[in-house]
Image (spheres, coloured by chain):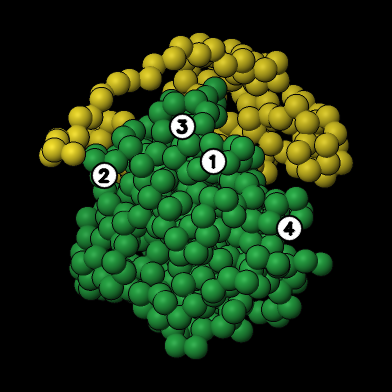
Amino acid sequence: MSRAAIVGVGQTRFEAARPAETFADLAHEAAAAALADAGLSMADIGNIVTVSNDFLDGRTISSMAVGDAVGAASGQGKNVSTVEGDGAFGAVYGLSRTLSGSYGSTLVVAHSKASEGDYSLLTNACFDPVTERSLGLDWVSAAALQARVCAERPGFGERETAAAASRARRHGASNPKAQVREPLSVEQALASPYIAPPLRAAHAAPLSDGAAAIVLAGEDLARRSRKPVWVAGVGLSADGRLTDRDLGKAEALSRAAAQAFASAGVKKASELDVFELHSTFAYQDLLWSAELGLGGVEERRLTPSGGCLCAFAAVPAGLVRILEAALQLRGEAANQVPGARRALAHGAQGLAGQAHCVWVLET
Amino acid sequence: MPEVEPLVHAGRIAVPYKWSAGLVVSRFLKAAVEEKRFLASRCPACRKVSVPPLRACGKCLVDNELEVPVGPEGCLVSFTEAPPAGKPAERRVFALIKLDGADTAVLHRLEGASLEGLEPGARVEPVFAERPDEAPLGVRHFRLR
C-alpha cells in the first residue's frame, strides 16, 4: 500500500481573544505557514480540507468563509471539502484523500475562535433539544459528571489530578504558541476554586482563538520533501452518548489506538517515544493515559507542548497535537524529547470525550 | 496601513425552532405527566433497556419493544453543581441518574440537595411536571428519597 507523510506544519499563536484577526485571517496565517514550512506553493497542492464548526463561527457553511483564505481559488480552483469536528478527525479525511491516489497532496486547515461566541451556550446545544437541553448542562458540567465517576477509581485523586495540571503548565510555559504560559504548582492547583465539583478552575483548558494547518503528501512528493514525518497508522472510534456509556472508561480511545497500532506494527503504546494527548481537563489526561497504558512513561514524553490545558481552540486542538508530534519527530519541538522516532497524537471530540482519533507517526 | 482599532460587530443568532419529539418520546412524556411512570424501550435482541425510549436499537438495528416500565425511582451515578449554560451567576445541581430497571442513564436537575455529603448511589425520585412540554422527561426535577 502507498504511504503518506506530513511534509509541512503551521500554527498561529493561541490567545484568549484575537480581535485583530477574522477567523479567515487565522486560517490563512496557519495555511501560509504550513506551505512555507513544506517549501511548497499552492500550485503544488492537490486539494484542500478545511475543518470548522458553524456554531463557533456563528454562520452556516463556515467552511466557505475560509476557502479563499487558504487558497481554494488558486490555479483552476482547488477541490475543497470540509469536516466539522476536531482537527485530528479532519486530518484523517485529508489522509484518505491523499492515500486515494487522486491527489498528490492535501492541505488540511482548522480554525476556531472561542472569543466570538458563548462556549457554554454553544456546547449546551450538544444536548438533546427535547429531553435534555433546557437543564442547562454544558461542556464543563458534562465533564464534571465524568470526573466524579473517575474520582471513584484509584489513581484519580486530588493530588494526581493537580499533578497532571501542573505538568501540562510546566510544559506549556516553554511553548511559544501556547496561550497560558505561567507555571502552576501542585499546591496552586489543589487550592484552585471549584468551577463544577470535582472540577477546579486549574483543571480546565483555557478557551482560545487560533488555527493550525498541515500538508499531507503522497509517497512521491514526500520522498522529495525536506523532513517528511510518515503516517504509520491511524484509528478512530466513537462511544455512546453521555448517558449510554461507562464514563470511567474511554473504550473508543482503546479501539482507536488498537486500529492505529495494528497498521503501525506497535504492540503497546509505551513503545512509542512521545505522546501528544488531547486532554481538555486534567482528569482526562489521567483517563486517556490509563486507557493507553502510559503509567510509568517519563513525564517529559507526555504532551510536551503543554496540550489543551495551555491552549484550546476547539477545532484545531487535535490537529495541533499531530503537528506538535511531527515537530518532535523532526527534532524541532519546544520541549524536544531527544531522539524521538515514533510518536502518538490524539484527537477527541464530543462531550466528555465521546469520540477519539489516534495517529502514530514515525521518522 | 494606518493604525486602526479592530471593530467588533456584535450580533445575536435567534432562530425559532420546533423539534418533533417523535411518537415514541411523545408517548413517554404523556405517560410521565398523566400516569407518573416512565415507559422505556427494550431491544428484543440484546435486551438493552433505554430511557427515554428509542424506536430502534442502534446496536442490533431492530425495532425495540416499547412500554417497558422503569423507575420511577433510581440512584445517582454522578452529580455536580455548576452554572446553567449562559447564566454564569447561577448555580444548579446536575445529576446523572440510573432509573431502576434501565440500562441507560438520564440527565436532570437535583433540587433540595447540597453537594455536601452527597454520594454516588444515593436514591432519588422524580417530581413530575403537569404538562408534557413543561420540562425535560416530563419531570420538573429529581429529589433525594
Q: What is the quadrant of the C terminus of chain A in the image?
A: bottom right
Residue at the image position 45 percent from the left and 68 percent from the top: A324
Marking on residue A18: 2
Labels 2, 1: one chain: yes
- Check disc 4 and report its element: helix, strand or loop: helix
Labels 4, 1: one chain: yes
Q: Amino acid at mark 1?
A: Ser
Marking on residue A65: 3
Q: Nearer the viewer, mark 3 or mark 2?
A: 3
Mark 4 vs 2, N-terminal side: 2
Q: Amino acid at mark 2?
A: Arg
Q: Quadrant of residue A4?
A: bottom right
Marking on residue A74: 1
Mark 2 vs 1, N-terminal side: 2
In terms of depth relative to the viewer, which is nearer, A125 or A311?
A311
Residue that protrudes farthest toward the bottom in the picture: A339
Residue B93 visible in the picture: no
* Chain letter belonging to callout 1: A
Labels 3, 4: one chain: yes
How far apart are the alpha carbons under marks 3 and 4? 27 Å
Q: Quadrant of residue A130?
A: top right
Q: Position of residue B72 (x, y in %)?
A: 58, 31
Q: Disc 2 vs disc 1: Cβ atoms closer than 8 Å?
A: no
How far apart are the alpha carbons under marks 3 and 2? 18 Å
- A190 relative position to A27: left or right: left
Q: Residues within 10 Å of mark 3 (few under 14, many from 20)?
A: some
Judging from the image, what is the letter of the chain drawn in yellow?
A: B
